[in-house]
């Protein structure tokens, strides 16, 4: 596949709606490679098809494996050199950095619904007000309302950073959404792009198979360096994905 770039109307739609369907982001080889890596990083976690119960210590049904680019060549290739990078530059600007990468595996949940991820903004985790941060949520399986696809509230990024509160029952933060939002079904290898300020959620996986996804987040390098400094995260490195920065020459 050739690296696509967004049309002017697609960029305008993204800024108006707060999300955009990116189409097929992974080719067959990349898709199988990331599926293999998801299984490797999932590791010890097992589930039972017989009773749809997950064997997981904290009794949740979603597995998060974070910041994996240093541990996987195929994952790093997609994260840093994927065919979506030109689109990130169009949305974010000339100096794009990688902020976060993550496998999110929603295991079979039946009617327990512990795999639900409530309404939130990605920027709500860390109180990040930067408007140009972008999330790419890439499906590794066909996803729909039955197995826990993403839901978005179009236009909700215009509300700005909202005050997130604990759910009281898990580590999740949440906010009240202004409406029910819309589901975003995807085929394996396809992705949805949305703002770090767009309200989104996912519901339970009512099938008998895991729902696998790969999450990538990008932003403007200088803006996120300033945000890191504000939080005292000076030792947390950012990957420069495209563009160029001045080298901090030592004082003589």
Image (cartoon, helix red, strand yellow):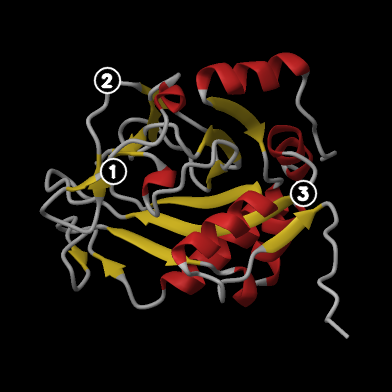
- Position of residue 151 measured from the top left corner of the image (x, y, whole percent): 37, 30
Which image quadrant is residue 193 in?
A: top right
Residue at which label 2 appears: 178
In-front residue for pair 19/211: 19
Viewport quadrant of the N terminus? top right
**152 vs 28, nearest the viewer:** 152
From the image, tell me which residue sits under label 1: 207
Sequence-first tag of 3 and 1: 3
Along the line of sight, the residue nearer the viewer: 57 or 8? 8
At 52% from the left and 51% from the top, the residue drawn is 215
Q: Percent x, y for residue 120? A: 33, 39
Left or right of 109, for residue 160: right
Quadrant placement of the C terminus: bottom right
Q: Which residue is mark 3?
A: 95
Q: Position of residue 168 (x, y in %)?
A: 11, 52
Structural crowding at the residue carrying mark 1, measured as other residues with C-alpha within 10 Å and reported as few (<14), some (14–19) or many (≥20)? some
* Vertical arrangement, residue 12 with respect to residue 1, above or below: above
**Residue under the point 58% across and 26% down:** 20
């Amino acid at each position: 596949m050739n690296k696509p770039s967004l049309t002017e109307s697609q960029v305008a739609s993204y800024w108006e709606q707060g999300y955009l369907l990116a189409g097929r982001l992974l080719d067959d080889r990349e898709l199988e490679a990331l599926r293999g890596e998801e299984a490797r990083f999932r590791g010890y976690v097992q589930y039972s098809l017989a009773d749809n119960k997950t064997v997981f210590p904290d009794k949740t049904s979603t597995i998060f494996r974070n910041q994996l680019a240093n541990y996987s060549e195929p994952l790093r290739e997609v994260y840093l050199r994927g065919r979506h990078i030109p689109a990130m530059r169009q949305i974010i600007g000339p100096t794009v950095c990688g902020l976060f990468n993550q496998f999110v595996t929603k295991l079979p949940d039946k009617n327990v619904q512990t795999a639900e991820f409530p309404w939130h903004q990605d920027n709500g985790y860390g109180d990040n007000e930067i408007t140009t941060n972008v999330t790419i949520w890439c499906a590794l399986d066909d996803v729909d309302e039955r197995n826990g696809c993403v839901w978005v509230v179009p236009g909700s990024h215009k509300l700005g950073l909202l005050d997130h509160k604990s759910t009281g029952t898990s580590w999740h933060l949440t906010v009240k959404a202004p409406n029910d939002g819309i589901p975003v079904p995807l085929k394996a290898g396809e992705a949805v792009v949305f703002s770090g300020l767009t309200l989104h959620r996912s519901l339970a996986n009512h099938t008998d198979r895991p729902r696998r996804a790969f999450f990538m987040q990008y932003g403007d390098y200088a803006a996120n360096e300033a945000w890191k400094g504000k939080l005292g995260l000076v030792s947390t490195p950012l990957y420069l994905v495209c563009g160029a920065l001045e080298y901090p020459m030592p004082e003589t």
